[in-house]
Amino acid sequence: MKRIMSSKGPRNKKQSDVRRHNKHFTSKSDQIKFEKIMNRACDAVTSIEAKKAEEELEKLIKTRSMANAKSVARKRLLDVITTECSSAVLEGAEVKRQDSGQKTVGRGPSSVDRVARHAVDLDADIERSAAAIQNLAQSSDITQSLSDIEMAQDDYNINVKDTHRADKKRKSQKRRVKKKELPKRN
């Protein structure tokens, strides 16, 4: 079974969140350690792993973050890690539940139900496509009896190069009027 949530989409957002909070650590090694802890917390499957990552992060913030950022950013960092941990735990539990064929948490269908519904929808789409192709094949006789545009132009003697613009006549009349108004020199 495939996983429901792709790790490619949200992963980029997680990385940007982690990098945004890197500024609270002065040394590069602390920033790298912070990124590792955050990634571990985001990828944690069990609540025990998430709790360990949260404790490590709290310890890192207490000891290594900048003094003026501790009070302001500590709560924000802990909120981020707690949310990431809880979503990782829920996602892991959901994947296990889906793999065993059980229903999802809440009212949603299980993966087996989703696959069955997708198969039914696919069959209906194939049936509609076949009907449309058959309809086109039957109506192709009608389109062959119609004459082309060029044939219609020949039939009705339409001059396609001639333009019937009203403003073209006005311009020529204005020029004639201007020519008449000029006095002739002798």
Image (cartoon, grey):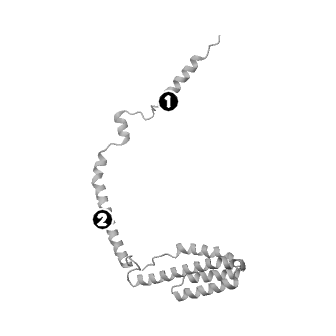
The image position of residue 48, as x and y in percent, is 53, 89
> Label 2: which residue?
127
- Viewer-proximal residue, 55 or 40? 55
The image position of residue 53, as x and y in percent, is 59, 86
Q: What element carries label 2?
A: helix
> Label 1: which residue?
167
The image position of residue 77, as x and y in percent, is 62, 78
- Viewer-proximal residue, 141 or 130? 130
- Viewer-proximal residue, 72 or 89? 72
- Viewer-proximal residue, 7 or 13? 13
The quadrant where residue 34 appears: bottom right
Can the viewer see residue 26 in this picture?
no
Judged by depth in the image, the label closer to the viewer, 1 or 2, is 1
Q: Is mark 1 on a helix, strand or loop?
A: helix
Name the amino acid, label 2.
Glu
* Structural distance between the alpha carbons of marks 1 and 2: 55 Å
Q: Which residue is drawn at 66% across and 83% down?
A: 61
Name the amino acid, label 1.
Asp
Q: Residues within 10 Å of mark 1 (few under 14, many from 20)?
A: few
Eyeballing the image, is 147 above or below 82? above
The image position of residue 76, as x and y in percent, is 61, 77
Label drawn at residue 134: none
Verify CB contact (< 8 Å) between mark 1 and mark 2: no
Can the viewer see residue 144 in this picture?
yes
